[in-house]
Image: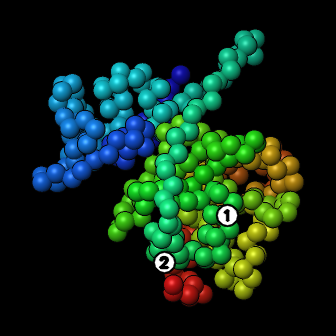
Amino acid sequence: MMISKNIVEQARNTDVVAFLEIYHGFTFKPTESGGYRCKQHPSLAVKADRLSFYWHSRGVGGFGSLDYLAKAENMPFREAVETITGTPCFTDYPKTSEKATPTKPRTLILPEKSGLQLRLYDYLCGKRGIDSEVVNTLMQNETLYEDRRGNVVFIGYDEYNKARFASLRGTYGDCTFRMDCAGSDKRYGFNMTACSPSECLYIFESAIDAMSHASLVDAETGDKTAWLRHNRLSLSGTSDIAIPFFLNQHKAVKSLIFCLDNDPAGREAAAAMVQKYSEKGYETRIERPRAKDFNEDLLASSTVISK
């Protein structure tokens, strides 16, 4: 069974410092050379690129979180990829004549919550232009919070209201840091459920885009609750692994609107999903952003009031 090259690359290029802070609870301090050194294990050093590492006392080093798990912890390749990405790597299914072995649920490791949520508001509302009412509602629903390192945490729950997926987004400066928390299961994506059963589900690549779309709806209608009339789901990428679970839990959904990024990968994935789910009996259509994604549309919209 093959593993998607995109998933492997995602694992291979995951920030080592951020991953070990979440996975092991390690803390790192900057060095004079611009790199990082682990406080708990001073012989563990990471270069300024936050990918190249060397653990001097163990005599092992490499590039990226995948190398770390494989070389420093002797974790099997497939297990290491799944640990980092939270994505099951199996691409085919057991034969119908064989009994499937139950998969042990992953243990999701959530980062510690910050006492104040100031960076979250500054990032989401100030830098991303997202309506504060949208942010407040999601925080009240406990699908969104700020961790003690200032990252925004987006959470997805299972049918028992247990957190099963969480992704992080950096907030400092022009930080592009993002990763899924260790133990995340992408079948349970971050979502914004309608306040009453809705037939429509809008589907996005990221939580930021889902929130941006909701903010655009509110701005265009002048109604701060308009976004609550329909469901929104983040795939955390271009895989549709989170869609079946959501549909199974929301039987009223009949129409799927694919709002993926307006780039080659997003357009290709949206077209494939339209065909797949229309064959399953759902009404499907594509709603592309004018720019690359809906957050860019939101920031460019003249209806957004500068916060």
Image position, residue 146 (x, y; %): 50, 60
Picture coordinates of residue 56, whole percent (x, y): 17, 30
Residue 166 in picture, x, y percent from top left: 56, 48
- Label ID, residue 283: none
Q: Which residue is mark 2?
A: 126
Neighbourhood count class around disc 1 (C-alpha, 10 Å): few under 14, some 14–19, many 20 upward? few
SS at circle 2: helix
At x 35%, y 24%, the residue is: 73
Q: Which residue is mark 1?
A: 140
Q: Amino acid at mark 1?
A: Gln
Q: Can residue 5 be spotted in the picture?
A: no
The local crowd at label 2, few if under 14, some if 14 to 19, many if 20 or more residues have their Cα within 10 Å, is: some
The answer to which of 279 and 294 lies nearer the viewer is 294
In 3D space, how far apart are the residues under numbered discs 1 and 2 (Cα atoms)? Answer: 19 Å
- Dot 1 falls on a residue whose secondary structure is helix
Cβ atoms under marks 1 and 2 closer than 8 Å:
no
Which amino acid, mark 2?
Answer: Gly
Point 69% across, 60% down: residue: 141
**Relative image position of residue 123 (x, y in whole percent):** 47, 70
Q: Nearer the viewer, mark 1 or mark 2?
A: 1
- Residue at figure coordinates x 59%, y 45% from the top left: 165
Residue 223 drawn above or below residue 81:
below
Residue 71 shown left or right of residue 202 in the figure: left
Q: Is residue 12 above or below residue 140?
A: above
Query: Is 201 placed left or right of 145 in the picture?
Result: right
For the rendered model, the colour scheme is rainbow
- Between discs 1 and 2, the one toward the N terminus: 2
Position of 135 with respect to 69 (left or right) is: right
Q: How many marks?
A: 2
